[in-house]
Image (cartoon, rainbow, N blue to C red):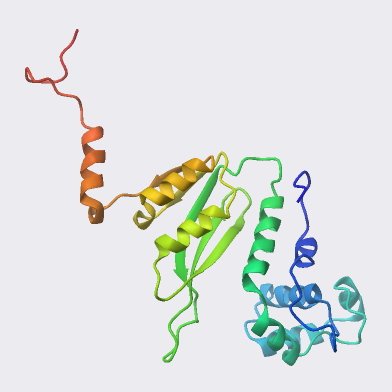
Amino acid sequence: MNTSKAVTLWDVLGQVPDHRSPSGRRFALRSVLAVAIGAILSGRGSLASIARWGRRMNKDFLCAFEIDRKCSPCQTTFHYVFRDLKVDKLERALGRWVKGLTPDEPLDHIAIDGKELRGSQSGQYPGVRLIAAFCEKAKGVLAQRAVPHEANEITAALRLIKETPLAGAIVTGDAIFAQKEICKEIVDRGGDYFFIVKDNQKSLREHIKTAFLEPTSPLGGSQAQP
């Protein structure tokens, strides 16, 4: 992709592969996604409320989203679209959009962190865990990965880093990410890192502490002067 100029959100939504059969398709995928994004930014949180939000929009709004019908998608359409949507493809497209906001500038700082998706946990289902790489300069998420329930954030973080542009950036994160494989991958891809080290890695913590101690002389006192 040419990153010499910023791309729009509408552009990248058009790059998401449409998983639906052409038969009976009434709305372009990016039109459905764009309406959903607009509704979510307006505070809607369910498929029904997203559909109601779109149905209230006038003809000019629909034309802006390339909808040539009298109304926007219904709740059923949103249901089938999101049920089978290739989430990883959408996330990568959104990551390209965020990176495109600052195409010719170094990213400087990228923070990686894992969180449980609010409202995703119920009595029958565990919460959805996500790990994301957030760029302060671009004010957005460059990449995001789901953390399987049987896995930990370390494995997911390594996969996340491999698909995140790191050249010239400093990566920060919690103590869980202070791992040899993660640090090596960051350096190999042109970045640097700054992670917290706690007592769960006692040997590493002691080595760091020793490295920053004031040098001492075997003759006693501080380091001997030449």
Q: Position of residue 193 (x, y in %)?
A: 44, 44
Q: Residue at x 76, y 82 (%)?
A: 20
Quadrant where the C terminus sits is: top left
Is 24 on the left-hand or right-hand side of 39? right
Is 149 on the left-hand or right-hand side of 44? left
Q: Position of residue 109 (x, y in %)?
A: 53, 46
Relative vertical location of residue 133 with respect to residue 37 in this rendering, above or below = above
Residue toward you, 40 or 177 = 177
Q: Residue at x 46, y 63 (%)?
A: 156
**What is the total number of numbered labels drawn onto the structure image?**
0
- Residue at the far top: name it: 226
Q: Quadrant of residue 210?
A: top left
Q: Position of residue 159 (x, y in %)?
A: 50, 59
- Residue at the far left: name it: 219
Q: Position of residue 215 (x, y in %)?
A: 19, 24
Relative vertical location of residue 222 with respect to residue 113 in this rendering, above or below = above
Relative vertical location of residue 74 with respect to residue 186 in this rendering, above or below = below
Residue toward you, 59 or 4 = 4
Q: Residue at x 39, y 55 (%)?
A: 177
Is 36 on the left-hand or right-hand side of 123? right
Q: Quadrant of residue 150?
A: bottom left
Residue toward you, 119 or 143 = 143
Q: Residue at x 40, y 50 (%)?
A: 181
Is 145 on the left-hand or right-hand side of 41? left
